[in-house]
Amino acid sequence: MAEHEQKKDDMQLEEDLILAWIHATGVLKNTRITQKMIYNEAVVMSIVYERYREDGVGAVTFGEICRRTRMLKSLVNRTIGTLASRGFLERRTGEDKRTTYVVPVKKKLPEFLEEHERSLALARRIIGLIGEEDARTFCRIAEKVFHADPLPDHEKDD
């Protein structure tokens, strides 16, 4: 009987985890954290901006964006195309002529940062709601899940 109860508890935990994941992603995707960019554009720009803050250049390869966002190459390409046509990003080719990367257009950074501030405001509201310690725990857990790659290869959408 105890084994049956443990299986039941395990199944409930699995259900709870999936529902928590759905709720968390729903909050992030459906809370209008951007007004002038769609969600994927804001995500790509955040990655490029993070690199820009680190090195003052912001060069990020398409492959790195795909890995970090888990977006399909076609979606990354389309998103970058839109951001480039709107003047936020510039495409560049590496010295080997095989690597393509993007860099932010500096004169458009203030416009992105205005949008990015909405994301930061949401983060501040969440921190205020759950507290700094739980926010740091959430970040640590999210990183652990991201780096563990929980989907088996045959379930990935490549």
Image (cartoon, rainbow, N blue to C red):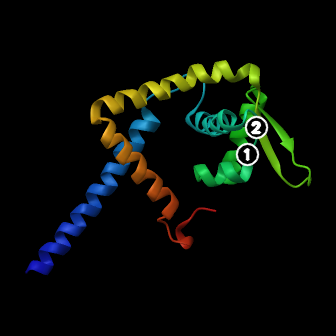
- Residue nearest the viewer, comparing 98 with 18: 98
Q: Residues within 10 Å of mark 1 (few under 14, many from 20)?
A: some
- Residue nearest the viewer, comparing 89 with 59: 59
| Residue annotated with mark 1 | 77
Quarter residue 45 falls in: top right
Give the left or right position of residue 126, taking residue 117 as reference: left
| Residue annotated with mark 2 | 81
Q: Residue at x 71, y 37 (%)?
A: 55
Give the left or right position of residue 82, taking residue 42 as reference: right
Quadrant the C terminus occupies = bottom right
Q: Residues within 10 Å of mark 2 (few under 14, many from 20)?
A: some
Quadrant the N terminus occupies = bottom left
**Cβ–Cβ below 8 Å for labels 1 and 2?**
yes
Residue type at mark 1? Asn
**Rendered position, 153 above or below 86:** below
Give the left or right position of residue 149, taking residue 12 as reference: right
Q: CA distance from mark 1 to mark 2?
A: 6 Å
Residue type at mark 2? Gly
Q: Residue 63: x, y in percent? A: 72, 54
Q: Residue at x 59, y 53 (%)?
A: 70
**Rendered position, 151 above or below 22:** below
